C-alpha cells in the first residue's frame, strides 16, 4: 500500500512517515503542494490514500483536493489541519476530502482513520488474501501458513518482504517486472542498488521455502516474476 504524505513541517512529517512505515506502508513524502501535484499527475494510480496538510507552500492541501475531484479522481484523501472551526471542516469536506483530522493528534488515531478510508475503497476491501497455504491479513499485517490440520503458523516478514508478497498476492495472474516492483514498492526518493529487487526476492523466497508453497513465486527469465500458476488458479 502506497501513501502520498504532503506535510511541510519537518518534524511532524518525519514522525508520520516513520509511523506509516512501521505499519508497512510505502510512503512518498512531499513538503509542498506543487511537488505533491507533480506526484499526483504522474503516479496517482499507485496511491492507496493521500494525507494532505491544509496549509502548504505552493498549492494548499484543500486546493489539491479540488484539483483531484475536478479530474474525477477518487483517491481517498485525509486532511490534516489546526483549523478546528465547523466552517473549516465543512469547507474541507466540500472540497473533496474524505476525512479531516485536527492537529495535534495521536498517531494511533491517524492510523485508524487511514484503515477506515481503505475499507471504503473497493480495491482494498479484501482484508485477507490466500494463495495455496499462505494467508495474508491486510488489516493486522500478518502472514501465516495454514497447515493440513488447520493450525496457522506465523511467517515473520520484514516490511519490504510483506509489501512484495502482498503485491504478488493481489496480482496473482500478472507478470511483474523489476521496474514495476521498484515503482510500486520503493519510495520515489529511495536510493537503491541495481540488485535490490533480486536481493529482497531471495530473502522472501527463503522464508517461503520453509512452507508447503516453496515455489510460490516463480522467475520468468527476461520477463520478471509471477505467482506460480499452479497456486494462482
Image: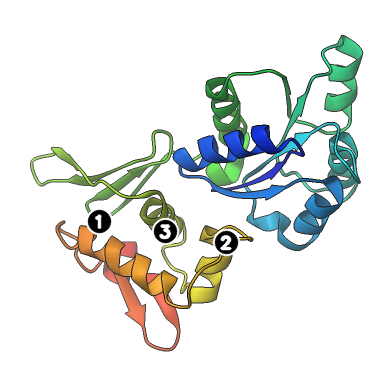
Disc 2: which residue:
190
- CB under 8 Å between discs 2 and 3: no
Alpha carbon of mark 3 to alpha carbon of mark 1: how far? 17 Å
For disc 3, the neighbor class at 10 Å (few under 14, some 14 to 19, many from 20) is some
Disc 1: which residue:
132
Position in image of residue 25 (x %, y %):
52, 45
Which quarter of the figure has residue 220?
Answer: bottom left
Relative placement, left or right, of 196 versus 219 is right
Image quarter where the C terminus lies is bottom left
Tell me the residue at 90%/44% (across/down): 59
The disc at residue 164 is 3
Q: Return the disc, 1 or 2, that comes first in the chain's sequence.
A: 1
Pick out the residue farthest to the top. 86
Q: Nearer the viewer, residue 24 or 220?
A: 24
Tell me the residue at 42%/40% (across/down): 138
For disc 2, the neighbor class at 10 Å (few under 14, some 14 to 19, many from 20) is few
Q: Is residue 177 visible?
A: no
Amino acid at each position: 500500500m502506497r501513501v502520498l504524505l504532503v506535510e511541510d513541517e519537518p518534524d511532524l512529517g518525519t514522525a508520520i512517515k516513520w509511523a506509516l512505515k512501521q505499519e508497512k506502508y510505502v510512503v512518498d513524502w512531499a513538503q509542498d503542494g506543487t511537488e505533491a501535484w507533480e506526484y499526483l499527475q504522474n503516479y496517482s494510480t499507485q496511491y492507496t490514500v493521500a494525507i494532505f496538510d491544509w496549509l502548504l507552500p505552493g498549492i494548499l492541501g484543500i486546493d489539491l483536493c479540488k484539483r483531484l475531484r475536478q479530474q474525477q479522481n477518487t483517491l481517498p484523501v485525509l486532511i490534516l489541519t489546526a483549523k478546528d472551526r465547523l466552517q473549516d471542516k465543512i469547507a474541507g469536506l466540500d472540497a473533496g476530502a474524505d476525512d479531516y483530522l485536527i492537529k495535534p493528534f495521536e498517531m494511533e488515531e491517524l492510523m485508524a482513520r487511514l484503515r477506515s478510508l481503505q475499507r471504503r475503497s473497493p480495491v482494498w476491501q479484501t482484508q485477507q488474501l490466500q494463495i495455496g497455504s499462505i494467508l495474508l491479513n491486510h488489516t493486522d499485517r500478518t502472514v501465516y501458513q495454514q497447515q493440513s490440520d488447520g493450525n496457522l503458523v506465523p511467517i515473520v516478514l520484514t516490511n519490504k518482504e510483506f509489501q512484495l508478497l502482498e503485491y504478488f498476492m493481489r496480482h496473482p495472474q500478472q507478470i511483474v517486472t523489476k521496474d514495476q516492483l521498484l515503482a510500486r514498492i520503493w519510495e520515489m526518493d529511495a536510493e537503491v542498488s541495481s540488485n535490490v529487487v533480486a536481493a529482497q526476492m531471495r530473502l522472501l523466497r527463503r522464508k517461503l521455502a520453509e512452507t508447503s508453497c516453496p515455489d510460490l513465486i516463480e522467475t520468468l527469465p527476461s520477463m520478471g516474476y509471477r505467482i506460480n500458476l499452479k497456486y494462482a488458479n
